[in-house]
Image (tube, rainbow, N blue to C red):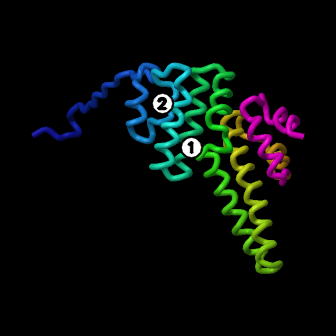
């Protein structure tokens, strides 16, 4: 009997290239959650991208945990940039999702509000419940906006350097952060984004 160590062992792997842009969008949307980001760049006519993204968002809302939904929607946006011109991606994101109505955006905001409410509740014990609750909502909204800005900005502009991060942390006005989130798709750099948001 031969010893296994004396034999030549080999493994054979076979791969097939799957071109995302040739795939049926309905099949991609019906697939696993991990395939959903590909739907926007599948065999979709540019005029149908908005409808496909709505279907993707509906599935994520119904089936995915908030953190996973955020990641997959962000991946959809990044992949769209590989197939479509920047102007079209911007138009789709502004015209269809209206970011503020987007479930994904709302999830990010709600997480920030929850964090802010927790902080506000703690302070509320010292200064009165209502005042703490109001402060918590304000802080939570700003935290949610900052979280969205950092996530989208990092994907779009790269990781902010420590000075930029400090500048972002110093912005406590939720309305100003909201404006920056809206401008993230058109900014060419963190500096350009923060200068435009003054």
Image position, residue 51 (x, y; %): 52, 31
Residue located beneath label 1 in the image:
71
Image position, residue 163 (x, y; %): 84, 45
Name which residue lies at 81% across and 35% down.
193
Compared across the picture, whether 63 is left or right of 71 comes to: left
Name which residue lies at 40% across and 24% down.
24
What quarter of the picture does the C terminus occupy?
top right
Q: Is residue 132 magenta?
A: no
Residue located beneath label 2 in the image:
39
Q: How many marks?
A: 2
Name which residue lies at 55% across and 34% down.
76
Image position, residue 23 (x, y; %): 41, 23
Q: Could you say whether the residue bearing mark 2 is in a helix, strand or loop?
A: helix
- Give the label, 1 or 2, closer to the camera: 2
Q: Camera-side residue: 130 or 176?
A: 130
Q: Which mark is residue 37?
A: none
Compared across the picture, whether 40 is left or right of 90 comes to: left
- Residue 126, placed above or below residue 16: below
What quarter of the picture does the N terminus occupy?
top left
Compared across the picture, whether 7 is left or right of 162 comes to: left
Residues drawn in magenta: 171-198
Name which residue lies at 74% across and 68% down.
119
CA–CA distance in space, label 1 to label 2: 15 Å
- Residue 150, placed above or below residue 189: below
Disc on the earlier residue, 1 or 2: 2
Q: What secondary structure do most residues of the magenta stretch adopt?
A: helix
Is label 1 in contact with label 2 (beta carbons under 8 Å)? no
């Amino acid at each position: 009997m031969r010893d296994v160590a004396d034999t030549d062992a080999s493994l054979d792997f076979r791969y097939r290239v799957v071109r995302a842009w040739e795939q049926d969008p309905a099949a991609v949307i019906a697939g696993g959650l991990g395939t959903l980001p590909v739907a926007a760049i599948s065999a979709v006519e540019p005029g149908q991208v908005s409808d496909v993204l709505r279907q993707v968002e509906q599935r994520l809302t119904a089936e995915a945990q908030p953190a996973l939904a955020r990641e997959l929607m962000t991946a959809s946006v990044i992949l769209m940039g590989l197939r479509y011109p920047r102007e079209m991606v911007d138009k789709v994101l502004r015209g269809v999702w209206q970011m503020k109505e987007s479930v994904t955006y709302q999830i990010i905001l709600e997480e920030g509000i929850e964090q802010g409410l927790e902080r506000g509740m703690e302070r509320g014990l010292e200064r009165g419940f209502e005042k703490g609750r109001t402060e918590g909502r304000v802080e939570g909204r700003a935290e949610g906006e900052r979280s969205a800005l950092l996530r989208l900005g990092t994907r779009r502009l790269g990781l902010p350097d420590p000075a930029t991060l400090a500048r972002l942390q110093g912005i406590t006005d939720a309305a100003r952060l909201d404006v920056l989130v809206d401008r993230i798709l058109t900014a060419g750099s963190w500096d350009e984004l923060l200068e435009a948001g003054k």
